[in-house]
Amino acid sequence: MPVADTTLPVLDLTQTSIDITRQLCDIESVSDNEGPITEAILTALAGADHLEVTRDGDVVIARTNLGREKRVVIAGHTDTVPLNDNLPTRYETEDGVEYLWGRGTVDMKSGLAVQLKLAVELSEPAVDITWLWYDHEEVSADLNGLKRLADNSPHLLQGDFAILGEPTRSEIEGGCNGNARIEVRTFGLRAHSARAWVGHNAIHDLAPVLDTLAAYVPREVEVDGLVYREGLNAVGITGGVAGNVIPDAAMVHINYRFAPSRSGEEAIAHLRELFAGFDVTVVDLAEGARPGLDAPLAKNFLAAVGGEAKPKYGWTDVARFSALGMPAVNYGPGDPLKAHADDERVAVDQITSCEQGLRAWLMTG
């Protein structure tokens, strides 16, 4: 009988951030299987005497304590969405651009690689740094390691500014949109479809809801200098009993992405106004985060990285830092349009530029 291979994966953080990305990606860590990559990170950090390293479940916290005036929190998640024949990684070239292909290359192990390399190399940064690598970002919010840490040990997240390594093509994306999901239901009366007049069709009653969605013009809202695009869409619809039965119930599932100028409470009030008279159930609500680019550290970061800050249209965990009163931005290699894609791949020059930008800023503040 063959013996199971219990060898733990090894990370060599002396390699380039591109090589480290490949090492991290080849450690499969689909949500619920973050244990091996967590162990690999802990082992790789063992010789970094300038870091105080602790573990909370599958969250790794590594802190400098140099007595600097400011503290920056830099975070990234270790899990990925499920595989689809996209591991192991490989290099490929297209139109003169070299890519690293494979699950996690964009979301977000290239960002992790940059963070881990800098964590071990920068023993005398200009600011104190709390590095956070956490589990269960790609699944239900109640499992999210960063959420658990924020709920149970918020002092470990405290700082003056936060950076989340979500893919941004190595450009700064400030804040994020909020996210709400509702279910709008209609109710009727069942009847045989040959005698439909004695029943009431709940699916037909969804017509005004769908008309409202089709006619809706999403806002473009400027928040602290960045323009956020909203979105209101049906993402699911259910109804029907059988091919000869008038349905007595129907539901449309609606997703609303709202600008961070609007609170979650205001977003839900807007939805209830749009669908007044219908049965509305809120099934998910996550507050957005303002850009925070007016903070001094954020201004210095933008100056060091260069380019022009953009808004983050999707929801990210920067909102958790914003809820704690910290300005936070997204910054990492990879095109977000390739996140979760079967052909997920990152341009390797973006990994290098992200490392250079973050390193320069952390050494100067």
Image (cartoon, rainbow, N blue to C red):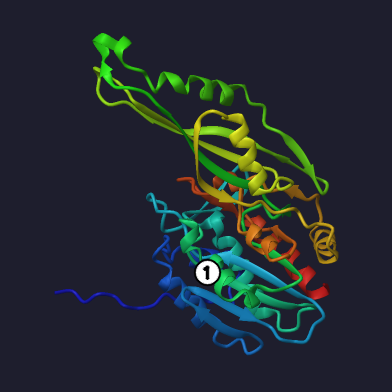
Image quadrant in which the N terminus is located: bottom left
Sort mark 1 into few (<14), some (14-19) or many (20+) by Cα contacts within 10 Å: some
Residue 332 visible in this rendered orientation of the protein: no
Give whichever of 89, 160 is nearer the camera.
160
Give whichever of 239, 231 is nearer the camera.
239
Q: Residue at x 67, y 64 (%)?
A: 321
Give whichever of 296, 191 is nearer the camera.
191
In the displayed structure, 2 sits above or below 78; it is below
Q: Residue furthest bottom?
A: 49
Picture coordinates of residue 55, whole percent (x, y): 51, 80
Picture coordinates of residue 250, whole percent (x, y): 39, 28
Q: Residue at x 62, y 74 (%)?
A: 154
Q: What amino acid is at disc 1?
A: Arg
* Helix, strand or loop status at disc 1: helix
Q: Which residue is mark 1?
A: 148
Q: Is residue 6 left or right of residue 51?
A: left
Q: Is residue 287 left or right of residue 298?
A: left
In the displayed structure, 187 sits above or below 30; it is above
In the displayed structure, 36 sits above or below 256; it is below
* Residue 9, picture quadrant: bottom left
Image quadrant in which the C terminus is located: bottom right
Picture coordinates of residue 146, whole percent (x, y): 56, 67
Q: Is residue 264 left or right of residue 240?
A: right
Q: Is residue 138 left or right of residue 98?
A: left
Picture coordinates of residue 57, whole percent (x, y): 46, 76
In the displayed structure, 245 sits above or below 302; it is above
Q: How many marks?
A: 1
Residue 25 visible in this rendered orientation of the protein: yes
